[in-house]
């Protein structure tokens, strides 16, 4: 082939080679021009898109958008270089193709050039012999004559290339001039567009967020030493639901101070809006503060995204994440009553605000449960100390596995705040005996072990002391939402103020209050009454009692307490029956037989009470409870009888009044019968409604209606009177029973008198009250209903009147028995007076005789 090419005239070869080189140069220049033009255009376009919005207060292109733009620029650049350079610059052009290209451009060649090149490139000599050498030489000569007059540059479209070169040159020069005139801006543009730097464009105004302050008015909780001005971390900050916030923005005084700053926001619900920030004072150095403490930051309830614009400077987006405020969600109690109560332990008992109280001296553990994980807790007890709690991860002393502990540091007094908590605090802890505390977990419970790893102390909360004497309480933390707070023992009311600090760096809105009352053990309660004893007793009396003694946690003992008018109190044991019943009487005669010093003298006064002690043993003596005091006069048998006789007389007089009222009721019922029988006169009766007065003459129908009304009124009055007389009569019967019991309990009078009181007065009167009066009531009610229905007849009236007569007869018989008893008592009194007179005469006679004997001896 080379040999063949040598046959082509050198001038033709130089022309073709020159064309070949110019084609490659054209391709390279055109491709590079297009690449430079593309890069220049995209540079200015990217700069415009990235920078121009800044001038109106918008943000630069996000890094992601710039990345996409850079990818487009790189992709198109690769396409240009591949399409306009790679695919053309390295193509091998043969001589025939180049000759054809020249033939098409220059007509003067008349195909001589392509013919010459084609025939000269034939590889087989036999093929060359087919052509006439003279014709080939002539054609070659024509090609040489024409080729000397052509310009290969005319093959190319130099106008289009020139335009592309011009455009690329202009764009390149513009970029160079931009870089020379504003190198910092150009440098930042290259870094932002091609290195995707996060550096911001320079602004005329520069603003920045100083912080977001949580406004707390009248806050009484613990602040944990935390600044309430929150800083944005990676453009985010967390606040509590309902918090009132104050946003503070600073404008750099070294640059242009904006007339106003505007906050553009969008809530998590998609609600958008804008708020102007207010100028506030000066920040020093010419800076200016802008604040916003109004909506949407006032009482914020949902997460918020916002940006702030001041002139040409926009900062953001910033995000305010609204989360729940830490709070105590549940409080339960584990407690053990004092040992003397003999109660079993109580676990997981609910705490009810304002209504939870425990016995004085109880061992109490308060279990607090929060709604979210906590970082620290502060507990203030105004009576003991302040406590600071933190959660630490420490290795188990035996297994070396990690365990979570709640460490509580107590202050020296209620006014002092405890210091910070750290792991070193647990090093060197000792118990009250000075033994080193090494913490481990045994069967799910925190314990302290000795050097050999044997448990020495196991409890839900372990108390220890630092070398400086600080008190540390340690418990096993099931989670960072729970805490065990011991109150052992409960000697005072508990009023804890609890503040929380969670892992979102949020302090509880208001402190949580836990109050538990310490109930002092109350003395036993005695409800006692005397049975069959009045205000006076004899020295030989039996004093029966009836009642109960109760105590929250059991009664230890009970006794009679008898305090004479002069001298020391006397006590007599009183056994308790069935755990609370008191029914054993005090026998004064039996007690005197055992101890003569307990004898009571007549004409004196004693104060009797029943007392009991409980099992309380925490401090001091047991609690002693006392019943009501009973003041009793000590009298002789005769004096007591005289008192009881006066009571009987008073009861008889009262009974006579009751009997008179029953008699009146009977007479009224007799008038009802007469009215039914039609035998009553118009002016009969003594009751007001029986008297017509000056009423005009009534018609027969009106008289009939009036009679029916009078009958109904009398029946209704009889019902009331019957019930009243029944109750009063029963009271008289009970009073006579009481007189009889006083006679028995004071060991006075004869059996006959006691029997007469019961069999002739009390029992018959109780029979009238329990049987006869209820029968009368039933018949009266039946007649009342009959009258109202208009069906009352003579039989109803007869039944009612007959029953009233029965009651009247039986009550009159009781009255006769009272009179007989009174006569009997008067005879007894007369005999008693005769005996007393005889004794007085006998004593006087003895005294006279002694006087006479003494006179004779003189």
Image (spheres, grey):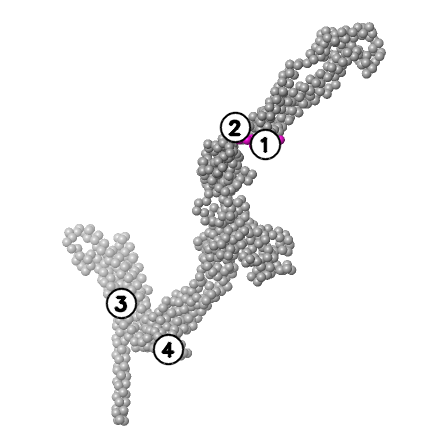
Query: Are dots 3 and 1 in contact, CB under 8 Å?
Result: no
Residue 202 painted magenta? yes
Q: In the image, which residues are magenta?
A: 195-203
Q: Secondary structure at mark 4?
A: loop
Q: Which one is closest to the eye, mark 3 or mark 4? A: 4
State the separation of the CA atoms marked 1 and 4. 111 Å
Indicate left or right for 782 with 376 as reference: left
Residue at which label 4 appears: 599
Query: Toward the viewer: 254 or 502?
Result: 254
Query: Are dots 4 and 2 in contact, CB under 8 Å?
Result: no
Query: Toward the viewer: 438 or 643?
Result: 438
Residue 311 painted magenta? no
Report which quarter residue 660 is drawn in.
bottom left
Ranked by sequence position, the earlier of labels 1 and 2 is 2
State the separation of the CA atoms marked 3 and 2. 116 Å
> Residue 55 at x, y = what percent?
52, 28
Ranked by sequence position, the earlier of labels 4 and 2 is 2
Q: Which one is closest to the eye, mark 3 or mark 1? A: 1
State the separation of the CA atoms marked 4 and 2. 116 Å
The answer to whether residue 579 is seen in the rendering is no
Query: Are dots 1 and 2 in contact, CB under 8 Å?
Result: no
Q: Secondary structure at mark 2?
A: helix
Ranked by sequence position, the earlier of labels 3 and 1 is 1
Residue at which label 1 appears: 63
State the separation of the CA atoms marked 1 and 2. 19 Å
Q: Secondary structure at mark 3?
A: helix
**Which residue lies at the image location 44% right of the left edge and 62% below the top edge?**
521
Q: Is residue 798 above or below residue 401?
A: below
Residue at which label 2 appears: 55
Residue at which label 3 appears: 655
> Residue 19 at x, y = what percent?
73, 14
**Which residue lies at the image location 28% right of the left edge and 59% below the top edge?**
719
């Amino acid at each position: 082939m080379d040999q063949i090419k040598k046959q082509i005239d050198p001038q033709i070869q130089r022309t073709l080679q020159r064309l070949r080189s110019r084609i490659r140069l054209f391709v390279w220049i055109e491709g590079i021009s297009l690449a430079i033009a593309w890069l220049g255009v995209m540079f200015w376009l990217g700069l415009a898109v990235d920078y121009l919005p800044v001038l109106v207060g918008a943000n630069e292109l996000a890094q992601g958008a710039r990345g996409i733009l850079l990818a487009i620029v790189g992709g198109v650049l690769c396409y240009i270089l591949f399409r306009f350079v790679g695919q053309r610059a390295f193509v091998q052009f043969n001589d025939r193709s180049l000759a054809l290209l020249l033939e098409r451009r220059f007509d003067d060649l008349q195909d001589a050039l392509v013919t010459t090149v084609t025939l000269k490139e034939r590889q087989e000599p036999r093929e060359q012999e087919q052509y006439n050498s003279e014709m080939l030489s002539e054609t070659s000569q024509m090609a040489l004559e024409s080729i000397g007059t052509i310009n290969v540059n005319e093959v190319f479209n130099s106008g289009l290339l020139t335009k592309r070169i011009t455009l690329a040159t202009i764009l390149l020069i513009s970029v160079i001039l931009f870089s020379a005139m504003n190198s910092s801006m150009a440098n930042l543009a290259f870094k932002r567009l091609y290195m995707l730097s996060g550096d911001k464009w320079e602004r005329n105004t520069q603003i920045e967020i100083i912080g977001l302050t949580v406004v707390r008015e009248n806050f009484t909780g613990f602040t944990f030493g935390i600044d309430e001005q929150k800083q944005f971390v990676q453009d985010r900050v967390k606040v509590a639901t309902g918090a009132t916030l104050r946003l503070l923005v600073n404008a750099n005084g070294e640059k242009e101070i904006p007339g106003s700053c505007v906050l553009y926001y969008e809530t998590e619900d998609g609600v958008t809006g804008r708020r102007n920030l207010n100028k506030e004072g000066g920040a020093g150095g010419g800076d200016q503060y802008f604040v916003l403490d109004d909506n949407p930051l006032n009482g914020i309830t949902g997460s918020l995204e916002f940006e702030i614009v001041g002139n040409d400077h926009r900062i953001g987006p910033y995000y305010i994440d609204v989360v729940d405020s830490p709070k105590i969600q549940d409080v339960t109690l584990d407690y053990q009553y004092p040992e003397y109560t003999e109660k079993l332990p109580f676990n997981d008992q609910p705490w009810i605000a304002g209504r939870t109280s425990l016995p004085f001296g109880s061992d109490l553990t308060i279990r607090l449960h929060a709604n979210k994980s906590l970082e620290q807790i502060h507990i203030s007890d105004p009576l003991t100390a302040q406590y600071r709690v933190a959660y630490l991860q420490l290795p188990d002393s035996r297994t070396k596995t990690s365990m979570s502990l709640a460490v509580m540091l107590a202050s020296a007094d209620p006014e002092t705040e405890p210091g910070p908590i750290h792991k070193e605090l647990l090093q060197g802890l000792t118990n009250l005996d000075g033994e080193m505390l090494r913490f481990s977990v045994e069967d799910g419970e925190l314990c302290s072990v000795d050097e050999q790893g044997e448990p020495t102390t196991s409890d839900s909360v372990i108390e220890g002391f630092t070398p400086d004497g600080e008190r540390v309480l340690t418990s096993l933390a099931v989670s960072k939402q729970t805490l065990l707070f011991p109150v052992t023992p409960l000697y005072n009311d508990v009023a804890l103020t609890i503040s929380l600090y969670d892992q979102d760096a949020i302090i509880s809105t208001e402190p949580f209050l836990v109050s538990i009352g310490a109930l002092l053990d109350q003395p036993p309660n005695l409800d006692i009454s005397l049975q069959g004893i009045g205000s006076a007793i004899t020295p030989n009396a039996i004093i029966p009692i009836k009642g109960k003694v109760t105590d929250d946690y059991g009664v230890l003992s009970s006794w009679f307490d008898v305090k004479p008018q002069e001298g020391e109190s006397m006590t007599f044991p009183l056994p308790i029956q069935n755990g609370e019943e008191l029914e054993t009487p005090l026998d004064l005669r039996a007690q005197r037989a055992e101890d003569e010093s307990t004898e009571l003298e007549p004409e004196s006064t004693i104060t009797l009470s029943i007392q009991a002690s409980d099992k309380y043993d925490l401090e001091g003596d047991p609690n002693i409870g006392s019943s009501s005091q009973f003041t009793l006069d000590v009298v002789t048998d005769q004096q007591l009888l005289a008192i009881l006789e006066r009571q009987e007389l008073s009861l008889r007089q009262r009974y006579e009044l009751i009997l008179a009222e029953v008699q009146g009721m009977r007479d009224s019922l007799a008038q009802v019968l007469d009215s039914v029988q039609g035998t009553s006169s118009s002016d009969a009766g003594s009751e007001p409604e029986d008297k017509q007065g000056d009423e005009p003459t009534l018609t027969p129908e009106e008289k009939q209606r009036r009679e029916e009304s009078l009958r109904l009124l009398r029946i209704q009055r009889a019902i009331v009177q019957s019930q009243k007389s029944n109750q009063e009569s029963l009271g008289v019967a009970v009073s006579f029973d009481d007189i009889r019991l006083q006679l028995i309990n004071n060991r006075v009078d004869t059996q006959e008198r006691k029997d007469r009181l019961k069999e002739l007065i009390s029992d018959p009167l109780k029979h009238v009250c329990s049987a006869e009066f209820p029968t009368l009531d039933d018949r009266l009610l039946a007649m009342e209903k009959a009258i109202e229905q208009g069906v009352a007849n003579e039989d109803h009236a007869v039944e009612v009147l007959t029953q009233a007569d029965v009651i009247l007869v039986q009550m009159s018989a009781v009255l006769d028995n009272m009179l007989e008893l009174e006569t009997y008592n008067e005879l007894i009194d007369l005999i008693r007076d005769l005996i007393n007179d005889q004794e007085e005469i006998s004593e006087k006679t003895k005294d006279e005789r002694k006087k006479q004997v003494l006179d004779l001896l003189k």
